[in-house]
Amino acid sequence: MSDSQDRIIIFDTTLRDGEQSPGATLNKEEKLTIARQLARLGVDVIEAGFPFASPGDFEAVQTIAQQVGTPDGPTICGLARATRGDIKAAGEALEPAANKRIHTFIATSDIHLQYKLRKTREEVLAIAPEMVAYAKTFTDDVEFSPEDAGRSDPEFMYRVLEAVIDAGATTVNIPDTVGYTTPTEFGALIRGIKENVRNIDKAIISVHGHNDLGLAVANFLEAVKNGARQLECTINGIGERAGNAALEELVMALHVRRQYFNPFLGRPAESEEPLTQINTREIYKTSRLVSNLTGMFVQPNKAIVGANAFAHESGIHQDGVLKNKLTYEIMDAQSIGVNENQIVLGKHSGRNAFKSRLKELGFDLSENELNKAFLNFKKFADRKKEITDWDLESIVNDQIQQPPELYKLELAQVSCGDRLRPTATVTLRAPNGEEKTAVALGTGPVDAVYKAIHQIIDLPNELIEYTVQSVTAGIDALGEVTVRLRHEGRVFSGHAANTDVIVASAHAYVNALNRLYGAMQSPSFSAQAEPTVTSRV
Ligand code: KIV
Ligand code: ZN
C-alpha cells in the first residue's frame, strides 16, 4: 500500500451515490459522458453504479467498464451489498475493465443491525469476510464498507475490519452514512482504526460521508490528518439527501492548503507536489456537465464552482483585487478552468473543425449524433456570432440529454408585453403522431407556455424548480433552462438550451414530461412511488 499512501486517492461516486439524489436519474449515454469527463479530470476510481439494482444499472456499469476502464484509465468500481447475487452482478458488469474494483458493504451499527438487517453482530462478523473472499474471486481489488460506521461501536467495527482485511480487502471505507459525526469525532474514529486494527497496514483507509449537518468536507479533511488516504466524493456534492462530500471542495482545499496538509502525509511542508492526481483545470467543466445532465442546479454561492465563487461585489473588495488579487483571492479562477472559455467557432466553421473541437472536449459522437449536433450548431451560429467551448458543450449536452421524444414540441409562440396578457400557442406531436394545439393565458410568458403544454399532456405534476442560466456573458448568450417536477413523490428533470429562453423553457418542460410519461409506461411504475430499497442504498 505504501506507494499510494503519500498521496490522496480520489474515488468519485457521482454516478452511484450522486445519482441517488432525487430526480438526478441519468441514462446510460449521460453516465458514459460523465465517466469520460471524470477520466479527463483525473479521478483514480469511478464508482459507476450498483449493477444488481436494475438491468439499466448493470448495462451502464458494463459500458463504462468497456469504454472508460482502459489500462491507462481509472479503476472502475461497482457497488454490491454483502450478498452473492450483488457481488456476482458487480463482478460480471465490471469484467471488461482493465482495472476493476468491487465495493461491498454491510452495516455495523446496532441501529441498522436491529431494525434493518435483523442480524446479530456475530452474523455480520461472519458474512463480511465471507463476501469479501467471494468478491476476490472476481478481482484482487476489493473495498469493504461497514455501513453507518459513524454510529457503530468502534470495538465491534475494528473486529469486522480485521476480518475483512484478513479475507483480502485492500481498501476499508469508513462511511458516515447519516452525516452525524463532527470533524473531531471523525478524525478520532480514523485514528482509532489506525491504532487498533491489527492488520490495517495491509489496506488503504478510505472515507465516505454525507452532508446532513454540512460537515462532510470538514470531516474528510480531519480524516486525512489522521491517516485516511482515499476520499469518496461527488461532483457538486450531489447525493442522497443533503449530498456527499464535494470533490471540488476537497481537491481545492488540499491544493490551496497543501503546505498545511503536506506534513500529515509525511512530506516536507514546502513540497509543491500535488496531493491528488486531479487536473484542477477540468473542475469547472465537470461541474457544469454534471449539473446540466442531472438537472441539479449549483447554488451561486457554492464554494469553488458557484457562479459567485470568484465574483467580488463590494467596492472595497474590487479595489483590493484590482491592486493585488492576493488581497481577497486565495485561488485563481483559472486553476479550476473558469477563464479558459475561448471563442472557438463561428457560423463559417466547417464540420471537421466542429468535430475535432468536440473530440478535444471529450465528446465522442456517432456519425448520426454528430450530424444532428452540427445542424444545431449551425442554427445557433446564425443567431450568435461567436461560439465558445461552453456553448458547444451546452449544445451537445442538450442533445445527448434528451429523453425519448414521446411528445415533440412543434411550435411555441407567445405574445406578451406591458399592454398584453401573456398568451401562448403551443403545438405538440403526440406519441401516436397526432398534432395537438392549445392556447393559454398566463401570469407571464413561461407560465402561459406551461399551461398550454399542460392542457395537451395532462399528467398531474407539481413544478418544483424552474431555473434559467446563461451559458456565457452577452445579450446573445444561450439560455439554459432546468425544470424539475414531482409526480407521486418522484422527481423528473428536464433541461434545454436555446438563445430564446421561452423556447428553451418549453423544451425543458416537455423533456421532463416525456421522462414522466416514459416512466409511467413501465409496468412497475405505480408500485414504485419512491425508489425502492433494493434499487437504492
Ligand atoms: O452512505 C453510505 O454508507 C454508502 C455506503 C454504500 C458506502 O453509500
Ligand atoms: Zn453514501
Image: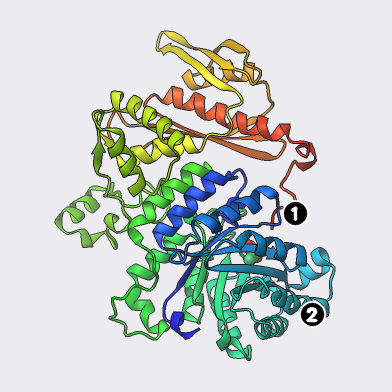
Placement of 264 over or under 43, stated as above or below:
below
Give residue 126's mark: 2
- For this view, does 335 lie left or right of residue 372? left
Query: In front here: 316 or 169?
Result: 169
Q: Can residue 41 be seen in this snapshot?
A: yes
Asked where in the image residue 42 lies, by quadrant, the reply is bottom left
- Residue 432 screen position, x and y as percent: 66, 18
Please report the residue visible at 61 percent of the width from the left and 26 percent of the height from the top.
406
Q: Is residue 310 above or below residue 132?
A: above
Q: Kindly identify the amino acid type of the residue bearing the numbered disc 1.
A: Val
For disc 1, the marked residue is 533
Q: Residue at x 49, y 54 (%)?
A: 35
- What crowding class fits label 2: few (fewer than 14 Cα within 10 Å), some (14-19), or many (20 or more)? few
Amino acid carrying mark 2 in the image:
Ala
Under circle 2, the secondary element is helix
Secondary structure under tag 1 reads loop
Where 208 falls versus 484 (above or below)? below
What color scheme is it? rainbow
Question: Residue sitting at 64 percent across and 21 percent down?
Answer: 431
